[in-house]
Image: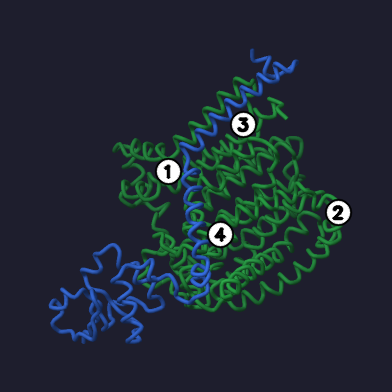
């Protein structure tokens, strides 16, 4: 009997949190996509809208907590906003999707079942395995506990306590604050319940993956790799897996935008890239690596338009981007006020001197070897598929270019960080190279997917 | 030969293309399964979910039980320190030098004991049993199997 009651409690918790996030997200997604909260003006599928709503909801929720600093007022304000948003979404849903013939076709039901199964498979280890990974305990969920205990993300959480210098208190706190909210709502802390926040990170990504679903080998390939190639990083409380997952999803959506020119793909891709800023500090590099191909693509696509016209046509997207960057600005200003500095000391004289020293003492070889050992199989797959694409006379797959360009920029950025690091280089490489290169591997897999997809389409098998 | 791939004109050619693609798909699958963590992840997920389903009652109880899971993840001395802190309502503490050098203790006690804070000025000190003699000016308040709580004036 208790098992059933607990299962129902877990279901209610997950369901209400999703509604909470979706409601907040719709208030941004509705106006951006349709210029309205209840009227549909663009032909976008619900399956593409829902993950975008969830990600926007996560960013808005984070923004509210950062603005108000306190958990309870943040939850209340978020709840009120969400209630309004979800009511508007309900009107929109019943008006355009519920009675529409295409809304619940067998294909969309299969896709929803797929999303449900994948999330359920990961729900097991997420909630049944306690927090035991080192960084999860010492950094991410320790920050969550600090926020939960203080009921605030402010100074009272204890960010400046001298005993916790090991905990990288300057890291973004989107997931910690979400985990703290979950514990706050439940009224207690343990080693299981805050991990549910990881599920809310996973669901949008899996939903986006299933928007690529079709009866093809390339989709099976995609599903085999994402999110499974990130292994325990999805459930152990590290953030590297999620950083790599959203970096990959952003590039996947960008590839589809190049092919189909659907604005929702570009919006979703940009949203994922901004979201990276709130997962980990490396997210700033990943976001930069992702936005460079977007900007280049935009320039090539709109050669005839002047910069002024480009801005005038898309002003609401830029405005939404600026709003989405607000939590980043807020957290950066808090960090500055509270003197929370990064251990890498980037931009200091010491870091430049490290760079010069390592450029000449043979460290470059060590850095390259360590990084290469983490990416060699992803490169093997890419090389193999690229040779195949030449054999099939399709050597230029334009959809794969953003992913490969972003991967290269990210690789160079990470390499530069290893050159600058104030830590012992061997220690730093041993403890982080495998995790930070997940994002590179993910983007190379995306590039490989588009090459495979092209070959499959050329072969005209079905 | 390559032109044949692109413009299949007969069923035979189409079958040939299909065979080539099958070969490609098989090779890709081998690379993915052999050289990425996908297969290991799948095996772990199957094992983990089987255990969760077999112990569904326990798993669900743990999720909704305050402080659950500590005994599974924290080193034994840390668990004993937590127990002592709860018994004596200690709000700040410090640990001995030997404990501080143990890579498994300082971070684990700081995060698990939070909001009780580690403070170098706290009169309450945790040390290993064999270290008690190193603190002659301190009074032993209590001790567990591996850890002692001492009060230093």
Sequence-wise, which precedes: disc 2 or disc 3?
A: 2
Report the residue at 82% width, 49% height from top.
A43
- In front of the other: label 2 or label 1? 2
Distance of mark 2 from mark 3, alpha carbons?
Answer: 35 Å
Q: Are marks 1 and 4 on the same chain?
A: yes
Q: Which one is in front in this view, the residue at disc 2 or the one at disc 4?
A: 4
Q: What chain does mark 3 sit on?
A: A
The Cα atoms of the two marked residues, 1 and 4, are separated by: 37 Å
Per the rendering, the colour in which chain B appears is blue
According to the colouring, which chain is green? A
Marks 4 and 3 sit apart, C-alpha to C-alpha, by 32 Å
Chain under callout 4: A
Mark earlier in primary sequence (2, 1): 2
Q: Residue at x 62, y 62 (%)?
A: A58
Instruction: Give the CA distance from mark 2 to mark 1.
Output: 52 Å
The count of marks equals 4
Which part of the image, by quadrant, shows the C terminus of chain A?
top right
- Residue where numbered disc 1 is placed: A416
Q: Do the CB atoms of the residues marked 1 and 4 lie less than 8 Å apart?
A: no
Q: Position of residue B89 (x, y in %)?
A: 35, 86
Q: Which residue is mark 3?
A: A451
Residue with the mark numbered 4: A123
Q: Verify CB contact (< 8 Å) between mark 1 and mark 3.
A: no
Q: Which disc number belongs to residue A100?
A: 2
The mark lying in front, picked from 4 and 3, is: 4
Mark 2 vs mark 3: give the one in front: 2
Q: Chain of mark 1?
A: A
**Residue sticking out furthest to the top:** B1
């Amino acid at each position: 009997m208790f098992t059933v009651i607990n299962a129902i409690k877990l279901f209610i918790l997950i369901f209400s949190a999703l509604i909470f996030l979706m409601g907040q997200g719709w208030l941004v997604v509705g106006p951006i996509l349709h210029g309205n909260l209840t009227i549909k003006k663009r032909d976008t599928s619900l399956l593409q809208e829902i993950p975008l709503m969830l990600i926007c909801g996560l960013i808005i929720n984070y923004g509210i907590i950062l603005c108000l600093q306190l958990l309870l007022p943040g939850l209340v304000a978020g709840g009120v906003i969400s209630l309004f948003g979800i009511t508007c979404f309900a009107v929109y849903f019943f008006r355009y999707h519920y009675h529409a013939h295409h809304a619940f076709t067998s294909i969309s039901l299969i896709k929803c079942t797929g999303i449900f199964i994948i999330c359920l498979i990961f729900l097991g280890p997420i909630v049944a395995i306690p927090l035991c990974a080192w960084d999860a305990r010492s950094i991410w969920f320790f920050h969550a506990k600090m926020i939960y205990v203080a009921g605030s993300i402010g100074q009272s959480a204890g960010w400046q306590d001298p005993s916790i210098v090991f905990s990288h208190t300057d890291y973004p706190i989107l997931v910690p604050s979400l985990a703290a909210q979950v514990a706050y709502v439940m009224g207690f802390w343990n080693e299981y319940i805050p991990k549910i926040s990881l599920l809310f990170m996973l669901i949008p990504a899996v939903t986006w993956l299933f928007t690529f679903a079709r009866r093809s080998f390339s989709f099976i390939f995609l599903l085999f790799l994402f999110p499974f190639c990130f292994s325990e990083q999805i459930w152990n409380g590290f953030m590297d897996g999620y950083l790599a997952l959203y970096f990959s999803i952003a590039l996947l959506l960008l590839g589809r935008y190049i092919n189909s020119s659907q604005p929702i793909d570009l919006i979703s891709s940009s949203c994922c890239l901004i979201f990276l800023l709130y997962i980990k500090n490396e997210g700033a590099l990943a976001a930069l690596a992702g936005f460079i191909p977007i900007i280049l693509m935009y320039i090539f696509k709109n050669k005839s338009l002047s910069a002024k016209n480009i801005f005038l046509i898309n002003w609401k997207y830029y405005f939404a981007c600026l709003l989405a960057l607000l939590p980043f600005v807020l957290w950066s200003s808090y960090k500055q006020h509270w003197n929370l500095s990064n251990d890498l000391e980037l931009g200091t004289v010491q870091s430049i001197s490290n760079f010069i020293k390592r450029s000449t003492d043979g460290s470059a070889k060590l850095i390259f070897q360590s990084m290469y050992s983490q990416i060699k199989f992803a490169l093997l797959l890419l090389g193999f598929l690229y040779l195949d694409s030449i054999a099939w006379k399709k050597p230029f797959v334009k959809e794969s270019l953003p992913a490969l360009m972003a991967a290269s920029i990210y690789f160079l950025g990470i390499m530069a960080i290893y050159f600058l690091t104030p830590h012992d280089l061997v220690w730093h490489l041993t403890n982080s190279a495998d995790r930070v290169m997940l994002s590179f591997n993910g983007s190379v897999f995306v590039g490989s997917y588009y090459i495979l997809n092209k070959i499959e389409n050329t072969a005209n098998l079905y | 030969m390559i032109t044949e791939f692109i413009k299949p004109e007969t069923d035979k050619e189409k079958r040939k293309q299909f065979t080539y693609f099958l070969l490609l798909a098989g090779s890709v699958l081998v690379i993915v399964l052999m050289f990425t963590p996908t297969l290991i992840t799948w095996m772990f997920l199957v094992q983990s979910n089987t255990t969760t389903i077999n112990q569904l009652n326990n798993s669900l109880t743990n999720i909704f039980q305050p402080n659950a899971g500590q005994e599974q993840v924290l080193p034994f001395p840390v668990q004993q320190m937590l127990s002592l802190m709860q018994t004596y309502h200690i709000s700040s503490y410090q640990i001995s030098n030997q404990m501080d050098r143990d890579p498994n203790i300082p971070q684990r006690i700081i995060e698990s004991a939070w909001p009780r804070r580690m403070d170098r000025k706290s009169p309450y000190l945790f040390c290993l049993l064999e270290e008690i003699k190193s603190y002659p000016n301190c009074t032993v308040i209590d001790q567990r199997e591996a850890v002692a709580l001492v009060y230093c004036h």
